[in-house]
Image (cartoon, coloured by chain):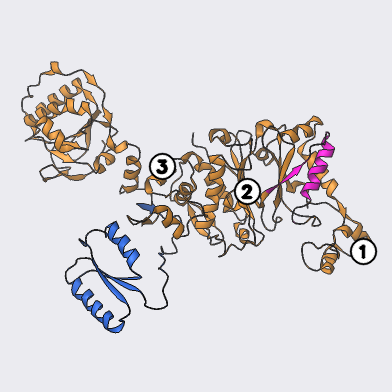
Amino acid sequence: MRILDPTDERVPVRRSLAARPEGLLGTVGLLDINKARGDVMLKRVQQRLNELLPNVAVKYYRKLTPARPAADDLRQQMLQECDFVIEGLAD
Amino acid sequence: MTSLPAFSLADLDGNRHSFPSSKTSLLCFVRDECETCHLSMPVIEAVYRAYGDAIDLWAVGQEDNEKLRERHQATVPILDDTALKVSFAYQVEIVPTIILAAADGTQILRWEAFHKEDWKELIARLSGLTDRPAPAIDWDKFPELRPGCGSRSVEPGVFERLTAEADGSRLRARQIEIGERDDPFEFMFEQGLTDGLPVVPPTPERVVRMLAGTRRDPQEVIGTCAPNYAPVTIEKIAINAVMAGCKPEYMPVVIAATEALCTKEFNAHALVSTYGPSPVIVVNGPIRHRLGMNMGINVLGHGNRANATIGRAIKLILRNLGGLRPGEIERAALGSPAKYGACYPEFEERSPWEPLHVERGFERNDSVVTLFSLEGSPHQIADQTSRTARALAGSLGLGMECGWHPKTHGVGDVLLVISPEHVDTLWRDRWSKDDVRKRIQEITSRPVRELLPTEDYGGLGAMPEQVALRHGRTAEQLNRMMPKFKNAKNIHIIVAGGPAGKWSSVINGFGDAAVSVPVSRKIEEVV
């Protein structure tokens, strides 16, 4: 849906960031959007997280295609299982 | 000669066709859902077979073009206008629409629906033009005339979308894409665009529809809105009116009220005050009836769309354009429910007096908004016992003395809403509005010495000594009588309310003329 801006347009549209946690604890989800070589980068991230933060759990998720938003089920699953998400975008 | 819009469309086999093409062209706008189009298709096909190599002849299909081709085994190119851009640009309202155009793209003739004689004349003309024989058509199978169907491009919702998307669209506001998975209502809350209640998402379609409520140019700047002094265009007013829930016919009222809001005299900047003032709109004249405004039972309350949304639109304009957001530049300590919007029509027909707008110099048949900067919430004054105008007006005066602080006198504008039962009591003694004003000033007049702060109660302003300084110190000065209002003219009176109930309401003032002056604007009606 598109809407027309009711303001004087002097302020850019803002989207608020999620609250920043104080430290890295809990579970980190890695989302592979299925773009070429995204898995290479994310697996390397996974390896480094395991080395540096052995108490942090890391879970790996994969989208079926980069062309569409993640399916609702996957989004819900990640919401429930993860405290953080790292996503590999673009090539 | 009408010059027709140029276009380029693909047919169902993917070949592109451009208009004008340097040949004579025959455009036939059709849609599969229309039986008159199906009646016409064999004629279009026959004409194509007869002249198609000499002129450009296209069916311009609005929907299900494959079905249309299959049903008629058509060889005539069917151009894909399912996006309806060309139909919209050609202002096609009825299908079929047949347009004959010269090689330079100017229109030679145009008709809608099915007319046997028109087709015959057209065929004769094409034969003359191309030197080819007329196709054999069994005309006995066709009726003389068959009405057409509505074009898809003018269907509700579609027309507004096409208007908003057209190259010559009158909309200029920034478009914000809301994610497919975002809830638009939640998005608008998150962006701080609402007054705390949900707003209607101002889609381009809805804004186009709202703009139909006025003849004014969407890009006309009607003023700047304090406190940020942002330019206010008709388009921005329409966007906020959509959000508030207005109907297009409310637009002239919202525009007139916004014009009043943007005047120096009204001084919307003062609305940032910790005192918590709000604009209060009074509507007079015939438009009250056309919009179905409520001037009777619960007039100052909820339940009527026009009353509620016109007032709300003004507040959203102040918020979104003026930047008047509580906790930011708006510093009201308490505020009032009127901050959601306050718009009331006068019940002129129930009043024996001149209505507010006539008192302010307009004709009775004019529709007018008057904008006040007031404390906001109505304060009810009950009097069930008075049987004379003098006693009742006395009660009203005593009730009105509470504004600001009972001991604060010499204050500015106030709005008194007198109920039908009360106005009957006043009019039984043939009291005019001025008589009521005079009585209010009379009963509230007190010696200055009684208005000074004491150890038992305080008041408005600075220390008691300074208040004394302001009013003077001599016995003569302290004995001077001071009415509640600086001038009787500060008491603005309207009649409104339900048939039963011996109570009136005062909407107390906020400042004097130095702060804000009530402003009236004539409403430009679109009938």
Chain for disc number 2: B
Q: Check disc 3 and report its element: helix, strand or loop.
A: helix
In the image as oriented, which residue stretches furthest toward the bottom? A52
| Chain B rendering hue | orange
Residue placed at 54% from the left, 33% from the top?
A: B290
The residue that label 3 is drawn on is: B209
**Chain blue in the figure, letter:** A
Mark 1 / mark 3, whichever is N-terminal: 3
Which quarter of the picture shows residue B88?
A: top left
Q: Where is residue B390? Give x, y as percent.
A: 84, 38
For the residues labelled 1 and 2, the Cα–Cα distance comes to 40 Å
Chain for disc number 3: B
Q: Which label number is shown at residue B474?
A: 1
Q: Check disc 1 and report its element: helix, strand or loop.
A: loop
Asked if both marks, 2 and 3, belong to the same chain, the answer given is yes
Asked if both marks, 1 and 3, belong to the same chain, the answer given is yes
The residue that label 2 is drawn on is: B280
Q: Where is residue A32? Give x, y as percent.
A: 23, 68
Label 1 vs label 3, nearer the camera: 3
Segment colored magenta: B378-404
